[in-house]
Structure formats: structure tokens, C-alpha cells
Amino acid sequence: MKKIILWIVIVLVFFLAFEYQKPVMTTYDATKQALACVNNPSERLAIKSVDYALKDLETVHTSINVKSGFFNQLTNQRDLSITLVFNGAEATVKMDAYSGKCIAVTGPLN
């Protein structure tokens, strides 16, 4: 019985260590993912799609934010906020920092 409990504790420690140290997306990958989110948004975002390419971007601002909640704090979970500026239009895309899943889009494009 003690061996089983010890193995469960070891597996949990490895799982938490892996979750805590997951790599965050690179700026280039995050920018491409944010652009894809703006160009082909899902219906739940309730925004119109636009047709921009990487060459249309004037500036990109990124920030990494800590997610709230006990489990998110325990496993060091993060969100990315990426502000894309194209020809005077500006959109901020909030996405998961690890998978690139689009959470929300705010700004003049929404």
C-alpha cells in the first residue's frame, strides 16, 4: 500500500512540475496565431473576419498575463495579449499562451 501511495505522489509531482514549466509560444508563432484568429474568427467571438497578412502589420505589442484562480496559480498558467496594428486599425487578441487558442478579440475590429 505504501508503494502505491509513493508512486502516486511521485507521478503527481512530475505532473505539476511539467505543467509549471511548459514553454510559452514564441512571439512570431503568437503573432501568426493572432492574425489567424482575426482573419478566421470562430462564431463564439462574434466578430467579422478581416483579410490581413503579416506584411500588413505596422506594429505588434505582446504581453504575458497570469491567469487567476488557485489551480492556474499553482501550475503557473499564462495568457498572451497581442495588440496588432494595421493601417490605423487596432485589435487586441487574448489567447492561451501555450496552445494559441483564441479567447477574445477586442478593439475596433470587434
Image (cartoon, rainbow, N blue to C red):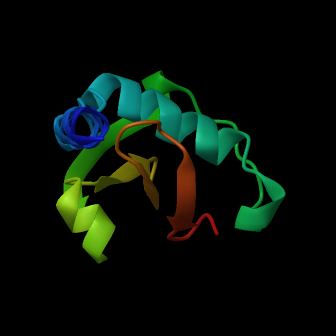
Quadrant of res 76: bottom left
Q: At which x and y percent is residue 95? A: 45, 52
Q: At which x and y percent is residue 103? A: 55, 59
Residue depicted at x 55% and y 27%: 53
Residue 68 visible, this orientation: no
**Rendered view: 110 above or below 10:** below
Most extreme residue toward the front is 1
Residue depicted at x 16% and y 37%: 17
Residue 11 visible, this orientation: yes
Residue depicted at x 24% and y 49%: 61
Q: Judge from the rendering whether residue 18 lies leftward or rightward of residue 30; answer left or right.
A: left
Q: Judge from the rendering whether residue 93 lies leftward or rightward of residue 11; answer left or right.
A: right
Residue depicted at x 39% and y 50%: 85
Q: At which x and y percent is residue 97? A: 34, 44
**Image quadrant where one finds the N terminus:** top left
Q: Judge from the rendering whether residue 35 lies leftward or rightward of residue 78; answer left or right.
A: right
Most extreme residue toward the bottom is 69
Quadrant of res 24: top left
**Residue closest to the eye, 55 or 14:** 14
